[in-house]
Image (tube, coloured by chain):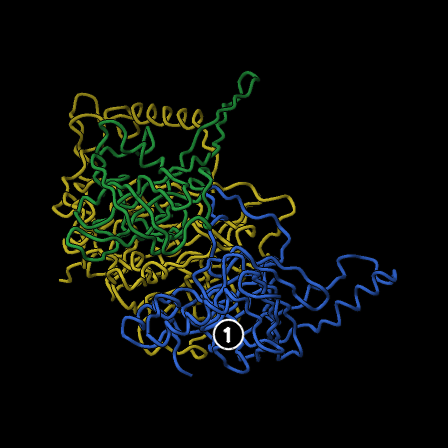
Chain colours: A green, B yellow, C blue
Amino acid sequence: MYPPNKVFMSHLWIYRPRQAVSRQSSPGSCMTHRSVVHWLGLFLAALAATAVAPAFAHHSFNAYDMSKTETVSGSIKEFRWGAPHSSLVVIYIDSSGKQQTMSLVSGSPLMFSKQGLTPRDFHRGDKVTVSYHPNTSGGAGGALASIVLPNGKSFKDTEVSAAAGPGAAGAPPGPPGQ
Amino acid sequence: MRTEFRWRPALKGLVLACAAVLAIGPGSAGAQAPPAGAPPAPDAKAPVYSQSGPPPPPPLSPVEKLVTALPPPQPGGGPPMLPLAADAPMPSADPHDLQGTWIHNQPLQFRMQRDMYGVLVPYNMEGAKVLARRVNSLKNGAPFINASAICRPPGPQWQRDLNFPFQIFQSKDWIEFVFEEYHGRWQLILDPAKAPRPAQKNYMGYSVAHWDGGTLVVESSEFKQPLWLDVDGTPLSANGKIVQRIRKVDNGERAPFLEIVSTFIDPTYYTRPWSVVRTYGWNPDLTVFTEYNCEEQIGDPSVRADAGLVPEPQD
Amino acid sequence: MLIIKSRPRPGIGSVLVRFLLAAGVLASAEALPATPNFEGVWLIASPTNTLKPLSGSIPFTAEGQKQYQENKRLRAKGAFDDYDITLSRCNSPGTPRLMLNSERFKIWQRFGVLTFDFEWNRALRQIDASGRPPKADMMGQGLIPTMTGTSKGHWEGDTLVAETTNFSDRTLLDELVPHTLDLKVTEHLRLLDPETLEDRITIADPAYFKRPWDAAVTYKRQPAALFPEDVCLDRHEAHQPVFPPK
């Protein structure tokens, strides 16, 4: 699971330098290159072997089976805001009727705010329906794909959608060219 | 510090150097030209080339084979280092005053494969095996527990190397580094009489420092547990020692930095001491830290204390 | 050169200089001394687990009273993780509860920013009195409610006035009193004398309190010291109290 508050994630940020070349026009002068580092806000997800496993990723979303989507209804135990990743703990009833918790990882606060969601939209005890790509380890939880809140608002994790894209199961969506 | 790299002159230099080497090739006439008609007198000191060019490198040792065969580390990024404002305060002119706010301003090295001279890290077989096991644990989807993953202090090297700011405060008796990440702290003791050894070993070790001219030499040892020097797990045993040489550099470009050369001394894992160098750019604008509160997640009693990671085998 | 002074400049100095500047006696703005210096090691004068109003009792709303009673009930049950994740997880006590901590803390004052570094678990909080714009926020970090909140300060003579907002609702004001995301904490920090620091704390949270209310905490200056490395999670795992008994 992605830990919030950039616990283990921050050092996995990849800053993609984009070279902007400026050429001097006078003949005989040396060409100078000035590198301007542009922040593209690309994240490499930490992969997790189990439901709560912050770790160090070599590839995004490797810990999740992107070809499968599971759905569960339950209630929010807590929602942890963090950058680059937030996480959600959901209480649900498993197939044997027992109450369990699962952790789901999701994106940055910007992703939520772009879809009109703020911390005030997530309350402990809220009944929610979530869809997610399960942990490859088999442990409960995974990468949040979408969530529907009791106030009718819903959220779709756009990075997860991109990663799960048609036939892209398991493909590491790292920045191109790296 | 980012510097402009001039490609054209570098290429030019390289071409000239190559030309010089070729021009001087074996057999060119020189002061020691042998008498005409006689074969060249063999010189026991000079290497004998069967063709022009340097000899092939020696074959990799078993340790080197093991380490170089590992999947490569992720490329690291670094923070965007924008120029300081024209009115930004600058560090003290006193070389013995390191105070201020600094941040590692080079791309993070996920795995220190080579030392500061570009030479392969001098693992012994024990160290190579530990590294290989750590790297493969991630590949196999069962990553090992390390300090960072469970919200514990990660040791001075990892703590400094993350691209997040820290402040330095100093008095005549000690110097304190306070880090944004892990709300970490590193204490350097200038006068051990004023700060006796802790009752129990610290994650960050015990660090004693003294000034050698303008360089602060810090010896860190007595670590509570083995260290991961970087994200991939370059090892340092709990008995290992890190000597850090810290100096403040101001080359007049309004981009002062700290340079820290870390020498790792650890016969358990390495055949000899080896060093890496890092720079930390000055940036007072980063003095306001982002809150770091890993305890909220790691301390959650409804999840496992090991954060779901796998304990590393201890040999 | 930043030198840690063992005694702060008295606040009256800055007042005097401003007067002299205004009167045209002092010619240059550079003659203004630094703002009051709170740097040093501090310890709460009267340890307490509760934030006591200066007068009367906490003016709870019905909602606030209900949540407060619920916290009491959960405490009696030992269900700590349901209402106080500092006790159950070593979560940062946040603002203002860190200011009630029974162990020492250091104040550093650099580039206009006050950094409070606590002996307990190496916890940190800061007050930004620099007046500088916030650093670039690429990922919406500023949208994250935090335990210590976002604290902006300014000096009024010898007093630092700090306002803190953007709180997570996962903390308590003290060992029991709840608050919401809308909490606003205003602090007036000043030196009563060179050895005594006062933090006058005003709590405003309309959902839980009918009106803002004040508490005050004082701290005594301590000798310079290095704090031992405290890792709350280790103590917690060893079933020791999260807040060590004094």
Q: Residues within 10 Å of mark 1 (few under 14, many from 20)?
A: many
- Residue at image mark 1: C100
In the image, taking residue C149 as reference, residue C214 lies left or right, namely right
Q: Quadrant of the C terminus of chain C?
A: bottom left
**Place of residue B263 in the rendered image (x, y in percent of width and height, measured from the top left):** 33, 57
**Place of residue C223 in the rendered image (x, y in percent of width and height, measured from the top left):** 53, 80
Residue at the limit of the structure toward the left, as seen here: B62
Residue at the limit of the structure toward the front, as seen here: C62
Q: Is residue B113 visible?
A: no
Q: Quadrant of the N terminus of chain C?
A: bottom right
Q: Secondary structure at mark 1?
A: helix
Residue at the limit of the structure toward the top, as seen here: A27
Q: Is residue C2 visible?
A: yes
Q: Residue at x 43, y 61 (%)?
A: C170
Q: Amino acid at mark 1?
A: Leu
The residue nearer to you, when weighing C193 against B102, is C193
The residue nearer to you, when weighing B9 against A57, is A57
- Quarter of the image for residue A154 reads top left
In the image, taking residue C22 as reference, residue C43 lies left or right, namely left
**Place of residue B110 in the rendered image (x, y in percent of width and height, measured from the top left):** 30, 46
Q: Which chain's residue wears label 1? A: C
The residue nearer to you, when weighing B144 against C51, is C51
Q: Is residue C62 above or below residue B284?
A: below
Total count of labels: 1
Q: Residue at x 58, y 55 (%)?
A: B91
Q: Is residue B261 above or below residue C15?
A: above
- Quarter of the image for residue A143 reads top left
**Place of residue C240 in the rendered image (x, y in percent of width and height, measured from the top left):** 31, 77
- Quarter of the image for residue C72 reads bottom left
